[in-house]
Amino acid sequence: MLTDVVIANKSYTKLNLSENSRVDDIALRVVRQDCPDFLLPMKTMEIDGEIEIRYELQEGIRLSYMSRQMSKKEFSTMIVNMLMPFKTCNDWFLDYHNFLLEENYILVGKNGQSIKYVYIPSPEYANSDEKIKDFFTTLILKTDITDDPGYLVSALRIIKNQDSNLITLLEYFQKQSSVPGEPEKTAPAPSASQAPQRPVFRPLGGGAPGPQAPPHVPPVSAVPNPFKAIMPEKKPEPPKPAVQERAPEHSTGAFGKSDEQGRLMDNLFGDSDEPERDKEGKGQGLFGWKKGKPKEEKEKKKPEKRGLFADKGKNDNKGRGPLQPQGRTLQPQQQPQPRPQQQPQSQPQTPQYQYQQYQGIDQMDDSTTIVDVSDEVSDNSVLKLRLEDCSGCNCPEFVEIDLSRGFATVGRMDKNGVPQADFNFDASVSFVSRRHFRVEICGDHWQLIDLESGNGTFVNQSKLVPNMPCPLNQNDVIMINCNRRRLVYRVC
């Protein structure tokens, strides 16, 4: 419907109306002679029976290029300025239904302080109220509020209500923003004469009233408890007799009693009642004259060595083999033979426990394959820049801009160090705007768009027209300069 053109280093968008189209002459005359601040100026001309209207894209950034991450205050200010023309256009004998609701042709000023619409003076392009509400609903859903994620929920409830309109939505955002015009009324601070005074007590028998001290209020402990006579008093329970611990005595042999005499005898002479000695003359207990368990029983409790590495030369295991426990004889069992591998008849079969021989380095194929570079697919999702010149600032030598989303903005951080774009230079590079230019993927190359920056953007020494895309290819030079300060990058 609209076509973007550049004429005399200025960007325009033009609209052609057919000869049969109805044109609102009053609106056309108002916009041409006394254009309101919220509309883009237009020029009309008749060519071959068709009316061509040109709108100059100036003083702002396209709404489609704006960042979707905003603070609560920034978004409220922008929405108020976008809704205000729908309220005031009747004073200019204009119909708000003829606003062009396309994000590419709504220009937003710095920090959202100004909004400019394209007005089409023809009833053929009029919008319905439902379409206008859907446009603002989509705009709210696309925005991400950084400091208050649930801020837009109330706005969506208002705009989705059937009984609400744009004025209701405007009043809601005016309360949330600090836009001048309807400041919030705050209660004045009380003066010294209006300061709250102490209550005045009047005597019962009459007399002149005067400020008196409040009556004495007895403490809580002095007030008698009215329920004390009703509730029965709890009698204190008698104290339980203390349980005295008894010293350990000699047990009489009952279960659970301590046997001091028996325990001492076992510690001194051992745990057996039969006084025996082993062959080596060693015993258990303090004096060593009581014998412990026989040596054969201890050897039985030792775990036997099993497996292929068991000792076969010991006398206690002679003739039984590595897997035969003492005192038992196992019947020989036929071990399962491993399944032979199928090999050609010309080659002999490998032994049972022979390891498989792997292919050595000398036997590997050392042939190389030459790949044609032209067959590779060029990946333009990353824009790489190399620093050519930098005067008056400290910038990185190599820059990689991620274009996985299809676009990315380049700018700098603010004075508080908060990033304002997708790729941000340091805040000391003050001649670069916070949102300076935008890079988009366009087929097999890129395109660069200047976002109404303060010092402009140059590509191959040609200054770009704001809001107009410029093709960008490899080896192109991007330059930003201001007086003696300059920043030059080359596309790798």
Image (cartoon, rainbow, N blue to C red):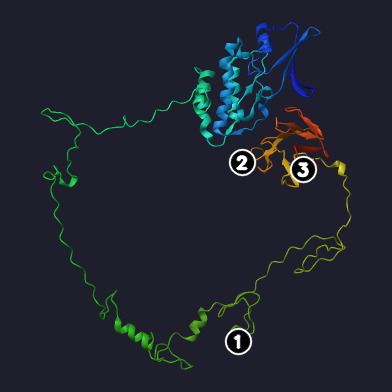
Q: Earlier in the sequence, mark 1 or mark 3?
A: 1
Residue placed under numbered mark 2 in the picture: 415
Q: Residues within 10 Å of mark 1 (few under 14, many from 20)?
A: few
Q: Residue at x 21, y 31 (%)?
A: 200
Quadrant where the C terminus sits is top right
Amino acid marked by disc 1? Asn
Q: Nearer the viewer, mark 1 or mark 3?
A: 3
Q: Which residue bears the numbered disc 3?
A: 384
Query: In front: 381, or 166?
Result: 166
Q: Return the residue nearer the eye: 213 or 20.
A: 213
CB-based contact (under 8 Å), mark 1 and mark 2: no
The percent position of residue 138, horizontal first and vertical second, equals: 60, 25
In the rendered structure, which disc, 2 or 3, sits on the residue that comes first in sequence?
3
Using the numbered discs, state the Cα–Cα distance from disc 1 to disc 2 in whole angstroms. Answer: 91 Å
Q: Inspect this view and state whether residue 230 appears.
A: yes
Q: x, y percentage for residue 487?
A: 76, 41
- Mark 3 surroundings within 10 Å by alpha-carbon count, few (fewer than 14), some (14 through 19), many (20 or more): some
Q: Residue 106 sits in which quadrant?
A: top right
Q: Determine which residue is flagged by label 1.
A: 315
The N terminus lies in quadrant: top right
